[in-house]
Amino acid sequence: MPTTTGMKGGGYYDANSKEQRSASDAFLPWLEEAIAALPDPAIHQYSWNFLDIGSSEGANAIYTMNHLIEIVRRQSDLPVWALFDDLPTNDFNQMFSNLFPESTPALSATDVYTAAIGGSAFGRLVPPCSLHLATTFNAIGFFETRPEAQLPGFVLAMQPNPGAPREGVEVTASELIPFQKQAYQDLSHFYAARAEELVPGGKLLVQIFGKNETQSTGHGLMDVLSDALLDFVEADMLPRSFYEDFLFPAYYRDIEELTAPIQNEPELAAAYRIEHAESRDVPVPFNTAFDETGDRETWAHSYISFQRAFTEPVLAAALPEDLPQENTIEKIYQRMERLLVDHPERYEFHFISIAALLTRL
Ligand SMILES: C[S@@+](CC[C@H](N)C(=O)[O-])C[C@H]1O[C@@H](n2cnc3c(N)ncnc32)[C@H](O)[C@@H]1O
C-alpha cells in the first residue's frame, strides 16, 4: 500500500509549492541539454512521448512540461504526448482543471496531447520502449511501503537534527537500516521500470528532496513537527504511543544513495549511463522573503503552509479518532506555526535538491 494518499488537494498544494518548483528549476538546464540529444522517434511512433511522475495537482508539473515542449519544438514539429502520473488517490480533478483552465489547454503549443496516469512510480506506467523522456520531481522520496520496523524516538527515518536537540528524541544507526534498505529497493524498482519504458537513447531526470554532508531537507520541517507532537503528548492531548508509532513515510537521500542502485546492480548499470549527478542547496522563496522583510509571522505562515501541503494527508490518516480535543489537527499546525515564530533559528530550513540525469543505453 502506498505510504501517502497524495498532497493536500483542492488547489492547496499548487498554492504552497513554490519551494518544490525552485528545487526542480535548478535542473532545467540539464533537460535542455537532454532534449537536444534525444534520438528521433522511431518511424512507427509518430510522436514524442514525455512522462512526468508524481505530478500532484499539476501546477509545477505543467509549468515544467510547457518548458520541455518549447525546447522540443525548436527541433521538431512531431506531435507530443504529455503524460502526467500520480497515485490513484491524487486530486486528478484539480490536475485536469489546471490542464484546461477556462477550457483552453495550458500546454499551448500545437499538436500536444495530454493524459493522466494513475499508478505508482515504483511499477510500470506505460508500454515498453515507448518513452523518450521521463522526469520526476519531489516525489520518489515517499516509501513504496512502510517498513515493519519501529522508530519510536523520532518522526522521520533520519538522525535527528543536532541543531534542534530535545530529550528523548533519538535514533540509532541500526534502527535506520530497514528504512535505508527500503529506500534502496524502491529506487531499484523505479530505475528498473523506467529502463523498460524508455527507448534506447531516451533520458531520465530524477530529482528529489535530499541531504548533503551538513544539511537535510528534513531539518527544520520535521523538527517542528516532532516538537509540536511531543508538546501535545506532554499536555495529554495525544497518547505517547501515537508519537512512537508515527512516521513521516519519506526518506531523504544523499547523492550517493540516488545513484547507488545503478552503480551496484549489473542490470541497471547496463541499462543507464549517468550524465550528471549533483546536490544543490536551492533558494527557498519563503526564506528569501524573510531575509528581505524580517517578518517572522509571514515567514512562519508560508513555511507551515508549504509543510502542511505534504504532511497533512499523512498526519490526518494516522491520528486516532477518539482524541480529547476536537480539531486536533488544526491545533497541531497552529502549534507548529507558533514554534516557528518563537524560535526561527531552531527550525532553519534548507532545500537540498538532489538529481541525476541518465541516458537509457
Ligand atoms: C511533493 S509532491 C510533488 C509534486 C510535483 N512533482 C512538484 O514537484 O511540485 C509529491 C507527489 O508525489 C506523489 N507520489 C508519492 N508516492 C508516489 C508513488 N509511489 N508513485 C507516484 N506518485 C507518488 C504524491 O502523491 C505527490 O503528488
Image: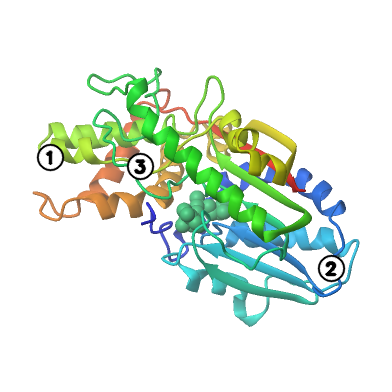
- Could you say where residue 29 lies in the image, as x and y percent from the top left? 78, 44
Mark 3 belongs to which amino acid? Phe
Which residue is at 56% across, 59% downward?
55
For numbered disc 3, what is the local secondary structure?
loop
Does the CB distance between marks 3 and 1 fall below 8 Å? no
Mark 2 belongs to which amino acid? Ala
Q: Residues within 10 Å of mark 2 (few under 14, many from 20)?
A: few
| Marks 1, 2: nearer the viewer | 2
Asked whether 328 or 254 is in front, the reply is 254
Which residue is at 62% across, 73% downward?
115
Q: Earlier in the sequence, mark 3 or mark 2?
A: 2
- Could you say where residue 341 lies in the image, as x and y percent from the top left? 37, 32
| Marks 3, 2: nearer the viewer | 2
Q: Earlier in the sequence, mark 3 or mark 1?
A: 1
Mark 1 belongs to which amino acid? Pro
For numbered disc 1, what is the local secondary structure?
loop
Q: Is residue 100 in sight in this rendering?
A: yes
What is the spatial separation of the Cα atoms under label 3 and label 1, in whole angstroms? Answer: 17 Å
Does the CB distance between marks 3 and 2 fall below 8 Å? no
Q: Residues within 10 Å of mark 1 (few under 14, many from 20)?
A: some
165 sits left or right of 193 in the view = left
- Could you say where residue 132 lies in the image, as x and y percent from the top left? 75, 60
Image mark for residue 42: 2
Considering only vertical position in the picture, is 204 above or below 355?
below
Residue under pointer 3? 248
What is the spatial separation of the Cα atoms under label 3 and label 2, in whole angstroms? Answer: 43 Å
